[in-house]
Amino acid sequence: MERQSSDFKRGVQAGISIAIGYFPIALTFGLLAKTTGLSIIETVMMSMIVFAGASQYISLTLLTLGTGTFEIILTTFIVNIRHFLMSASLNEKVEEDRPLFKALYAFGITDETFSVAATKEGTVSTGYIFGVCSVSYASWVVNSGIGHLVGASLPETLQESMTVALYAMFVGLLVPSMKKSTKAIYLAGVAAVFNTIFTFAELLSTGWAIVLATILSALIIEAVESFKTRKAKGGKPLED
């Protein structure tokens, strides 16, 4: 018990940098949630139950567009599907414990908490990962609520204009990825083409257009990448 308490404190210390990093992002989420029309209870509950920044921002965009519930759930599932891989990878590094405890801290796995736990030397104890996830989770939830309260004090005209910040934020998230990876450029481009076709041709609703465009672009780009990889391997000369 004493060891777990000590590990928990070390986890909290390791997670403080994540908590500080979450402060402006969660604050902005709360502000945008207010301008989207969510109440403070709905905003805080979303952060408590979902605890996934990108998915929550996407949800706000889809809510603004009037997208249906099922489309929002499916879209956020696709965005967060990488968490299966992160959890499976981290399962090889954490100490053996009861499945209930693993399920609890698996909920707290984000890109940032995964990075901290995965780069820790040696085996990751249950207390340590609970410490990392707890301080990160608290920062995200509390600052989401604070952001909503700040948004409520802004003039109504400014609140309405803040919805534009959603699109600016996604552009800000996309551009750095496109600079680092050609694959990201192709993914964004193909998804944009499909979404434009589905939307302007009125083949699908806005929500389903986004979902299907995302899935199709991912499948096509991955198929092309796999074909190029197989072709490159097949074209290599045999070693003597």
Image: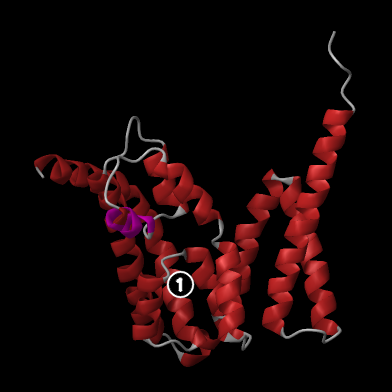
Horizontal relation, residue 14 to residue 3: left or right: right
Q: Does the magenta stretch include residue 102?
A: yes
Taking the spot 78% from the left edge, 68% from the top edge, the residue there is: 192
Q: Which of 4 and 175 is in front in this view?
A: 4
Total of numbered circles in the picture? 1
Q: From this view, report whether residue 199 is shown above or below residue 182.
A: below
Specify start and end residues of the magenta stretch as a single range. Answer: 100-106
Question: Can I make out residue 150 in this image?
Answer: no
Q: Residue furthest top?
A: 240
Looking at the picture, how far across and down is residue 39, in whole percent?
Answer: 39, 88
Taking the spot 31% from the left edge, 59% from the top edge, the residue there is: 104
Q: Residues within 10 Å of mark 1 (few under 14, many from 20)?
A: many
Horizontal relation, residue 112 to residue 191: left or right: left
Horizontal relation, residue 131 to residue 212: left or right: left
Report the residue marked by disc 1.
Answer: 29
Q: From this view, report whether residue 56 is shown above or below residue 231.
A: below
Q: Does the magenta stretch include residue 154?
A: no
Looking at the picture, how far across and down is residue 174, in whole percent?
Answer: 65, 58
Taking the spot 30% from the left edge, 47% from the top edge, the residue there is: 129
